[in-house]
Amino acid sequence: TVIYSIWNAVNDPLIGYITGKTSKVTRRFGRHTPWILSGIVLCSVSYVGIFAVPDWIRKKPVMLFLWMVTFVCLNDGFYSLWEVNYQEVFPNKFRTTEERSKTAVIATSIGVFGIALGAVLPPIFYSYGDPGSFATSAMIIGAICIIGAILIRRGVSETPEMKLASAKVEQ
């Protein structure tokens, strides 16, 4: 918990600093969109790593500790990668109070549904005493998240005006 807490304190500002730079990819697709989409995919993959612990690691307490700390910190870092950029693109993409209110209602509804689904769905696929079933459950949840990333692509894509504004800020 201490290691994770220290990482969590450093993580968001570090992610903000790293993703604030422009590159060939961000000039083409927008300053935030590539980070949002790659962050969701990487977060999904690292989530699977939390639960897909190889047998030989599970049998060695120190190795298990290192595995868990590594994957929990990776997962948090990749979560921050998409979340920090999503929070930054939101006010630029939705300029009026009406747009923000409508979008917030949709996002909140999806979030509430996702939380409920996240509590109900995993237990369908795992059973206590069977470590492999936890990995299977995590892979299903990870796949659902990656599908979600594909579905939100249009919603988080930056407009040409936003890309131009980001380029001007960089200069």
Image: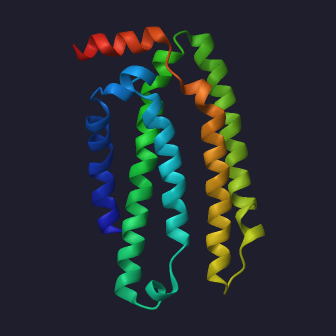
> Is 62 situated above or below 109?
below
Relative placement, left or right, of 54 versus 121 is left
The structure residue drawn at horizontal position 71% and vertical position 35%, both measured from the top left corner, is 109
Residue at far bottom of view: 59
Relative placement, left or right, of 78 versus 120 is left
> Is 63 situated above or below 167?
below
Q: Residue 8: x, y in percent?
A: 33, 54
Quadrant where the N terminus sits is: bottom left
Q: Residue 117: x, y in percent?
A: 73, 53
Q: Viewer-proximal residue, 164 or 81?
A: 164
Residue at far left of view: 171
Q: Residue 42: x, y in percent?
A: 48, 51
> Is 76 situated above or below 82?
below
Relative placement, left or right, of 135 versus 28 is right
The structure residue drawn at horizontal position 21% and vertical position 13%, both measured from the top left corner, is 171
> Is 45 situated above or below 105?
below
The structure residue drawn at horizontal position 47% and vertical position 19%, both measured from the top left corner, is 91
The structure residue drawn at horizontal position 64% and vertical position 73%, both measured from the top left corner, is 134
Q: How is the image coloured?
A: rainbow
Q: Viewer-proximal residue, 27 or 53?
A: 27
Q: Residue 168: x, y in percent?
A: 28, 10
Q: Viewer-proximal residue, 100 or 67?
A: 67
